[in-house]
Amino acid sequence: MQEPQPITVVLADDHAIVREGIAALCASHGLRILGQCADGATALEMVTSLKPDFAILDLQMPGMTGVEAIRRLRLAGSTAKLMILSISREESTVMEALRAGADAYLLKDGPSRHLMDAISFVRDGGIYISPLLRGAGLFTKSGKSQVEDPVASLSPREMEVFSYLVNGLRAKDIADLLEISPKTVDTYRASLMRKLNVHDLVALVKFAIERNLTSTS
């Protein structure tokens, strides 16, 4: 029987000691590091050329942020699992990362097991948000702001579908990217439209443009 291929990873962080620590952790769990870099532009090039299973990206890097790198990779059709690693606990930052197409948002001050948990969860098709953020009240009813933004009511998966829809992707293309069925995409679309109180794609795109939530805004 042929042994399964190891999960491949690209790492991007402008602090070498952080990169080396993550690389050592990944290697200790049988993952294979394809490349490491210190800036977003190089990360973009590495993920595009090396086609890893996962990319772990620092939020703030010289030249290009991790979120911007993710946004460009998704627009280019990358199917890599993309994970943000950050010190920021701001809900707006987390939501921006998810809107861009991140599959996971991890905190640098979290335990190392969170990274392995995230890789396992995301590999199976989930969206992983650090338990430290959920424990702080983000993405829960108790964490809602006084003036509630309907966008904040979207689940991470609904946010992904929303982002792809308003940037012109068809249900079949979204289904292929997210590795789900077109029917499931339609279910998410109906749910997010109901939450945002819009009734067709034109109104959804208008909503996104007004809030600067499209890639061309």
Image: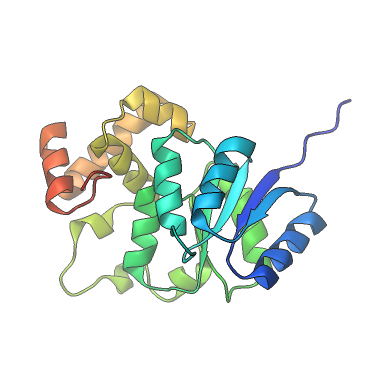
The correct choice, above or below, for 174 with respect to 105 in the image is above
In screen coordinates, is 44 left or right of 2?
A: left
The correct choice, above or below, for 5 with respect to 11 in the image is above
Q: Nearer the viewer, residue 14 or 168?
A: 14
Q: Nearer the viewer, residue 48 or 85?
A: 48
Q: Position of residue 159 (x, y in %)?
A: 33, 48
Quadrant assignment, res 20: bottom right
Total number of numbered labels? 0
Q: Position of residue 43 (x, y in %)?
A: 55, 50
In screen coordinates, is 38 left or right of 35?
A: left
Quadrant assignment, res 95: bottom left
Q: Quadrant of the N terminus?
A: top right
Q: Nearer the viewer, residue 62 or 158?
A: 62
In screen coordinates, is 196 left or right of 49?
A: left
Residue with the most extreme right position = 1
> Residue at image x 85%, y 32%?
3
The correct choice, above or below, for 163 with respect to 183 in the image is below
Q: Is residue 153 visible?
A: yes
Q: Position of residue 128 (x, y in %)?
A: 51, 55
Q: Is residue 51 visible?
A: no
> Residue at image x 59%, y 44%?
46
Colour basis:
rainbow
Q: Position of residue 62 (x, y in %)?
A: 48, 64
> Residue at image x 25%, y 41%?
191
Quadrant assignment, res 117: bottom right
